Amino acid sequence: MALLTAKTFSLQFNNKRRIKRPYYPRKALLCYQLTPQNGSTPTRGYFKNKKKCHAEIRFINEIKSMGLDETQCYQVTCYLTWSPCPSCVRELVAFIKAHDHLNLRIFASRLYCHWCRRQQEGLRLLCGSQVPVEVMGSRGPRSDTTWEGEFPGQSNVQGEEEKRRERKQELLALQLLPLGPGWFPSSLSEFADCWENFVDHKEPLSFNPSEMLEELDKNSRAIKRRLERIKQSWSVDVLENGLRSLQLGPVSSSLSRSNSR
């Protein structure tokens, strides 16, 4: 399979809000991994936008052309530099609904025009269609969730120790990345998993990959919060519609949706 160059990965998966000079276009790339439930070797590949054909559509056409066994279940993971546009969202949702033997997960490095209402509605459509869409980054424990058996406001020493231990293991693994693929436990970060499986590691590097991946994970935190706000506004919409259908009167102004950036 064709692989990305390390330079292409570092430039195109860059998730900084603003890029420094020299400026360059941040293009749409889609890396996919299709894993059969029977444990067979995964199939991997990547696509980029072509004239009048987005990477997501090329990905759909590729999966259709494989003639997959519909009696077999498949896990499909996609890593995107940009979240899908509304048009591609509709195509992805229709594709998954027509192929219920596929389980699709989408991870995006950046949210495309996240301030636009249409883009937010597209992300909500994916979530409402049982297609998980998340921001690429560390998969460690979330600091804003309550641990099992812990009440809000109560500290959890064991949970904090676990987080520190996992972070230490992650940093140790990052130091091994220059040794090439196979050294990084892919369960820790989507960026590291994408780097390991879709990048050509034979070429000499002009940067430190461990520092790059650590910065990508750090930048992803704000983008994750932004996506969560978009999802939460979708949940409020569902609640509002449910209350209206029950004819319980007007919805409280506290439940009104606010656009999020």
Image (spheres, rainbow, N blue to C red):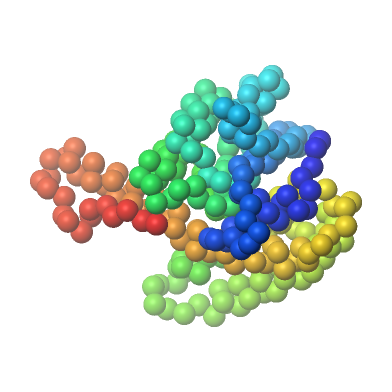
Q: Residue at x 42, y 78 (%)?
A: 154
Where residue 197 sits in the image (x, y, percent)? 77, 47
Q: Is residue 197 shown to the viewer in this render?
A: no
Residue placed most toward the observer, 255 or 28:
28
75 vs 183: above or below? above
Q: Residue at x 64, y 40 (%)?
A: 30
143 vs 190: above or below? below
Where residue 120 sits in the image (x, y, percent)? 40, 45
Q: Is residue 33 shown to the viewer in this render?
A: yes
Give the total number of marks visible in the rendering.
0
The answer to which image quadrant residue 117 occupies is top left
Residue placed most toward the observer, 88 or 49:
49
Q: In the current view of this chain or complex, which residue is farthest to the left?
A: 249
Q: In the current view of this chain or complex, which residue is farthest to the front?
A: 22
Query: In which quadrant of the rendered image does the N terminus lie?
Result: top right
Where residue 35 sits in the image (x, y, percent)? 70, 36
Where residue 228 sits in the image (x, y, percent)? 43, 56
Q: Is residue 224 left or right of residue 42?
A: left
Q: Is residue 116 left or right of residue 56?
A: left
258 vs 126: above or below? below
Q: Is residue 153 left or right of residue 19?
A: left
Q: Is residue 169 left or right of residue 252?
A: right
243 vs 144: above or below? above
Residue placed most toward the observer, 221 or 244:
221
Query: In which quadrant of the rendered image does the C terminus lie?
Result: bottom left
Q: Residue at x 38, y 41 (%)?
A: 118
Q: Residue at x 57, y 64 (%)?
A: 219
